[in-house]
Image (tube, helix red, strand yellow):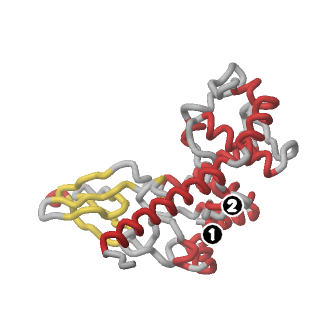
Amino acid sequence: MRVSGSDLVKFQSLLNSVLASLVMALTSFTVNAGVGEGQELYNAYCQICHGELGEGQTMGKPLTDGMANRLSDEDLLAVITDGRAGTGMVAWAGSFSDEEIFDVASYVRALQGKPGLNLATDDSGMANNPMALAGAELFNGSAGCSNCHSYDDQGGNVGPVLDSVSSRLGEDALLQVLLNPSASIASGYGAKVVEQADGTTIRGRYRNDSELAVQIQSEDGRRWVTYFKDRVKSVTDSDESLMPDVFATLGAEQQEQLLAFLNSL
């Protein structure tokens, strides 16, 4: 029997559709695994504060809108595991196993109308790494790193994007950058010092230049300021990085946590 070219095309298309459906089915099964178990735990321990459907109560914030709905999977797991200092959200690490915490988080995602979590396809390296999770909280919180740096398209833009930073630099080089930010400044992220005619100076990231003006982004990344050249005395390169020596001010454990997080990106 002869098979025409059009028949082969149709067969290939059908095969692709079947494979795609199979992949979707397997993915759905993996992602939503544990939701039922998580619902049982949620109903027993969580709904008293957060409400039956995550709508929130006097003692607990809603889980279906606001901040909880914007948390990454990693941050959601971290909040359930470690709690939140200064709030009524307690740490469940001593009461729930890692699997149970994962199940509760999956059920919370279901309440939010989102797919459950899937650690098997989580390539961030953080899901089963408490040090990296703690480092993520530092990065996005008290250390202030996210004000200038971004990953996964979230964060500031004064400093370089940090996706795969450890793979690009190597762990040893990354550590050196943290210890001495001014020793090696990434191309395009150096600081400029603008001296105005009245003697005042402004330091920030160089952004744009024209015949009439120069544009500088402030050190905190919040403002882009234009300086007209007829009022500018000089524009010079700075030898010092815009990155503050935050790493040196951290304790040894916090340094390890932040490194673990950066190495997981």
Question: Residue sitting at 76 percent across and 24 percent down?
Answer: 48
Q: What's the mark number on residue 108?
A: none
Question: Residue sitting at 66 percent across and 38 percent down?
Answer: 108
In the picture, which quadrant includes the N terminus?
Answer: bottom left
**Label 2 element class:** helix
**Label 1 element class:** helix
Q: Quadrant of residue 158?
A: bottom left
Residue closer to the observer: 181 or 260: 260
Q: Position of residue 256 (x, y in %)?
A: 72, 66
Query: Which amino acid, by three-letter code, is at mark 2?
Result: Ala
The residue most toward the right is: 94
Position of 174 with respect to 236 (left or right) is right
Q: Position of residue 29 (x, y in %)?
A: 65, 51
Position of 98 with respect to 119 (left or right) is right
Question: Residue sitting at 22 percent across and 58 percent down?
Answer: 197
In the picture, which quadrant includes the C terminus?
Answer: bottom right
Query: Which amino acid, by three-letter code, is at mark 1?
Result: Asn
Q: Position of residue 112 (x, y in %)?
A: 58, 35
Above or below, comparing residue 229 to residue 84 in the picture: below
Say whether residue 75 is visible. no
Say whether residue 80 is visible. yes
Q: Position of residue 127 (x, y in %)?
A: 69, 57
Q: Spatial distance from mark 1 to mark 2, Cα to Cα?
A: 8 Å
Question: Label 1: which residue?
Answer: 263
Q: Quadrant of residue 76?
A: top right
**Mark closer to the chain start, 1 or 2:** 2
Above or below, comparing residue 146 to residue 91 in the picture: below
Q: Are marks 1 and 2 in contact (CB under 8 Å)?
A: yes
Q: Residues within 10 Å of mark 2 (few under 14, many from 20)?
A: many
The residue most toward the top is: 58
Residue closer to the observer: 110 or 242: 110
Q: What's the mark number on residue 132?
A: 2
